[in-house]
Image (cartoon, rainbow, N blue to C red):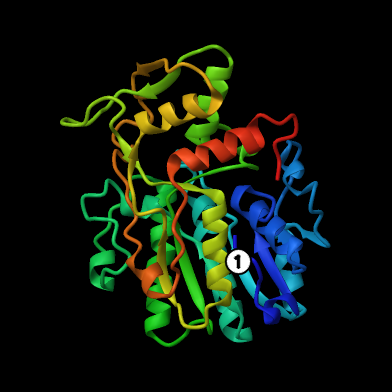
Amino acid sequence: MTDKINDIISALMILVTGGAGFIGSNLHACLTTQGVETIIVDRLRDGEKWRNLRRHSPTRLISPDDLPDFLAESPPLKAIVHLGAISETTARNGDLVWHNNVALSQRLWSWCVDHKVRFIYASSAATYGDGTRGFDDTAPFSRLRELQPLNLYGWSKHAFDLWALAEAQSGREPPNWAGLKFFNVYGPNEYHKGHMISVVKVKFDEIMAGQPATLFKSDRAGIADGSQQRDFIWIDDVIDVILFLLTCSTANGLFNVGTGNARSYLDLARSVCSAAGVAEKIDFVPMPKRLVGQYQSFTQAKIDRLRQAGYKRAFTELEDGVSQYINGFLRRTDPYR
């Protein structure tokens, strides 16, 4: 990760929505170890999500319901990193998803415009749909409008991306802003995510229980079972990109956050077996009906814009990231960061 955060960031506060979640809690851990004061906006509810914050307790935890009152006080924020959302790709309540993923994002954007505060928010690779229109964040506005997300979650993220780009074109934008299209992120602190947890964790649990690693059969002609490909990215690389954008004064717009290298699910399953020291045993199971027609069989981030903005670091290879996750976290009794 970035070794030192710019002193100007350390002097003020950064607000992180979804800060007790997967990416948010990893960002919070990194910021606090660098001496940055973070304010967490999230709901812990009655599960184990609180454990994501246990090693790095925030100075302030705010319920999303209380966020408007907090912002009305005009706190001296250096940046808002907006990661909170309904992220389930099978979500069905359109009104609730719009309220959380679009309307709230619009209000935070407008607050940052009015208060001249940097704004970074989570978009998603789900905005690209089935990938037939590419995964190009350098595409002109007119081409981006042609994207067809496969599910409600991806559509809501796409709707806000288009709104933000239109606002920026009209001149109403924060002094610095970035929408981050995260690809398939894996790593510690994701354990509360239920069926949305990374495939790395699911396959590790399977093989440690003495079962074969199961993969979905392909539902696309011309794609063999296990040959579906995704751009898998290690969480530390994601955090490093966010830290870069928190200190870069010249980067504005949408950015893909992936490795730029698609790998197959077979590659991933084999990497998990290797890192765990278990003989390979992989079975294929039918695609669940709820995913048929909504499953991305190929994703690969085009990361030209990120490189052009000045981010030069190499991304972690899948085998290395999986090994770090399994041997650095999942094998521990307490696998949290």
Q: Position of residue 180 (x, y in %)?
A: 46, 62
Based on the displayed image, in which of its 4 quarters is residue 260 positioned? Answer: bottom left
The number of callouts visible is 1
Based on the displayed image, in which of its 4 quarters is residue 141 positioned? Answer: bottom left
> Above or below — where is 335 with respect to 86?
above
Which residue lies most toward the left here?
222
Q: Residue at x 57, y 53 (%)?
A: 236
Q: Position of residue 192 (x, y in %)?
A: 65, 37
Q: In this view of the protein, can residue 18 be seen by the observer?
A: no
Q: Quadrant of the N terminus?
A: bottom right
Horizontally, residue 76 falls left or right of residue 167, namely right
> Above or below — where is 235 with respect to 163?
above
Which residue lies most toward the bottom here?
171
* Amino acid bearing label 1: Val
> Above or below — where is 60 with respect to 72?
above
Horizontally, residue 250 falls left or right of residue 33, namely left
Q: Residue at x 68, y 77 (%)?
A: 9
Q: Secondary structure at mark 1?
A: strand
Q: Residue at x 16, y 30 (%)?
A: 221
Q: Which residue is mark 1?
A: 81
